[in-house]
Amino acid sequence: MTKDTTQLPIARRMAAVALLSLGLQWPFASHAGCSIGTVALPVKMVGTRAIATVGINGTQVPLLVDTGAFFSFLTEAAAQQLGLRTRALPGDIRVQGLTGSVAARLTTVDHLKLLDGDMPGMEFIVGGNEAGSGAMGLLGRNILGAMDTEYDLAHGVIRFVVPGDGCEKANMAYWAGDTPVAMVELLKDYRLKRPLIRARVELNGHAAIAMFDTGATTTVSLDAAHSAGVKDAAMTATGLMTGAGSGKAKAWTAPFDSISLGGETVRHNQMEVADFDLPGTDMLVGIDFFLSHRIYIAQKQSRMFFTYNGGPVFALNASAPPDPAASRPDAAAGEKMSADEYARRGAASLARRDAAAALADLDRACAQEPGNAAFFAMRASVHLALKQEDKALSDLDTALQLDAGQAEARIERSAIRRTRNERGPVLDDLSALDRTLPPQSQIRQRMALLYESMDMPAQALAQWNLWIAAHRHDIALEHAYNGRCWARVQLDIELDKALDDCDEAVDADSKNASYLDSRAWVFARLGRWQRAKSEFDRALAVKPDQAESLYGRALVHQHLDEPAGALADLAAARKIAPAIDADIARYGLPTVKP
């Protein structure tokens, strides 16, 4: 989720007319005297990410559908990969994410292909963190909010809608039939051309304001949780949450008795809670809600209409249904569907944790189009969810036989084979990826980690160098700095650069025991034994059972002629990790003397 602190002049250039002028055929239908024209944008769920593919200057670019983003974004790496020039944002425009500021610039795309039409001279903000799931950026409200929008993610589609005469006060849930329709009034914000999708809700009977955000999972702010009567003692810490910005927020899960919106009430939930401060918003209603509902955003009415699809409403809610009856996404199962429609519905079912339905649909997709590599790769994800690893590998093999350029399938196959200790095939796949991937690819981060896990620091270092060069402002940069520092420590090379990297990592998170341990080993390599001891002390203060740090401090004690300390730390390290001596030697690090 991202927001702007001032109205972007460029945002005013993107209006409904831009979509209407694409030269598309808008099929019209009539519903209760209200005539509407719709055009569909296919969306594929990858995990819990809704991904739409657009064309940018002739290249297919997957973007995360993000109703929480005020504008459409490309990552820095994507802009580099696409050869786009960037420039400073105009005026005093600043971009703020949920967890901090975003280092942002601007670029102009000569040709944006969307919905089979061409939109020339479209502007994108460049910045933010990697969204994952193969996304190279975000599709934001400057496009999604240009007209009425229907989110039918359970079927893998977004529809842009042009309402005709007679729709001013109509119930816009034209698909509902006898299914109950919920409606909420959306809050207006005349300061913004494309305002946030916000509405009033109730948390445990207490009034709150929710923002509907496909780029997030449902999350309640810490202040709103407290206002709803949730006590700190009832919350379970889950770590840190990240968003589009440069910061992190503490996160928990907590029980809520009820959440009500539009006459729909969901009871007895475990909800995510995070310590974020977003003015005018108490909670994010995220992709989990969009998957369990079919939703229509009526711009002129400032209303949202929705029906319930069935299944869990929120990600952490086991199965408790809301009060109204469901209009299940498979209600029209008798209709003839294309292989792509089956595949998209199957991916959505997997995101909704219905693996059986997902498998049935993807079986149909693969049977209808046995030459489509993407369908087999998608079905592999279902097999993994069902713990059918052999079948997943078989599907990944088929996908790569059909299309050797399926990079996500290849890195997934590498990860599975790594767990099976199939070193040769893993290295073959990683070599193929290294030859064919763009230098800026996000997949190189996973490649570095796989090489690291196989004690191949030189190869890991090469991948870290490429990834870091293209991700200078990414939230994961601190982990990459630590990985590159560790690779150099293992190789005993460029220790000044290793120290710089470890300093960057520790500056980002001074309580991370792994970062502190890496820096301690740098000082040990440099023979700066007192400083190494201090760093190992800091690492062990955070994580007393970190065997590598105990072993490293034992080594330091030996060099400082402190035999009692060396014996004590070595004994503790061996008790925690009996193979620690062999592990340290395998890492290529100096070992203690007998």
Image (cartoon, grey):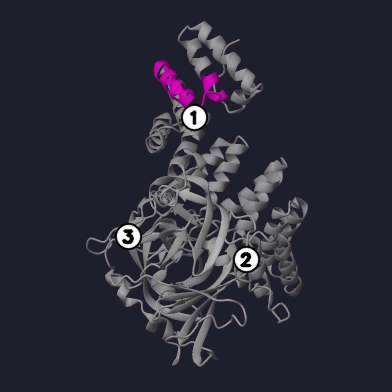
Residue hosting label 2: 348
Q: Secondary structure at mark 3?
A: strand
User: Per the image, is 536 magenta?
Assistant: yes
Residue type beneath disc 3: Arg
Rendered residue at 34%/72% (across/down):
188
Q: Are marks 3 and 1 in contact (CB under 8 Å)?
A: no
Q: Residues within 10 Å of mark 1 (few under 14, many from 20)?
A: many
Q: Find the residue positioned furthest to the left.
A: 91
Q: Residues within 10 Å of mark 3 (few under 14, many from 20)?
A: many
Residue 428: percent from left, percent from top: 67, 48
Residue hosting label 1: 489
User: Per the image, is 417 magenta?
Assistant: no
Span shown in magenta: 529-552
Which quadrant is home to the N terminus? bottom left
Which is nearer the eye, 85 or 210? 210
Label 3 – label 1 distance at C-alpha: 35 Å
Q: Residues within 10 Å of mark 2 (few under 14, many from 20)?
A: many
Label 2 – label 1 distance at C-alpha: 44 Å
Residue 48 vertical position relative to residue 165 in the rendered view, above or below:
above
Q: Are marks 3 and 2 in contact (CB under 8 Å)?
A: no
Residue 261: percent from left, percent from top: 49, 66
Q: Is residue 375 visible?
A: yes
Residue type beneath disc 2: Ala
Question: Which is more N-terminal, label 1 or label 3?
Answer: 3
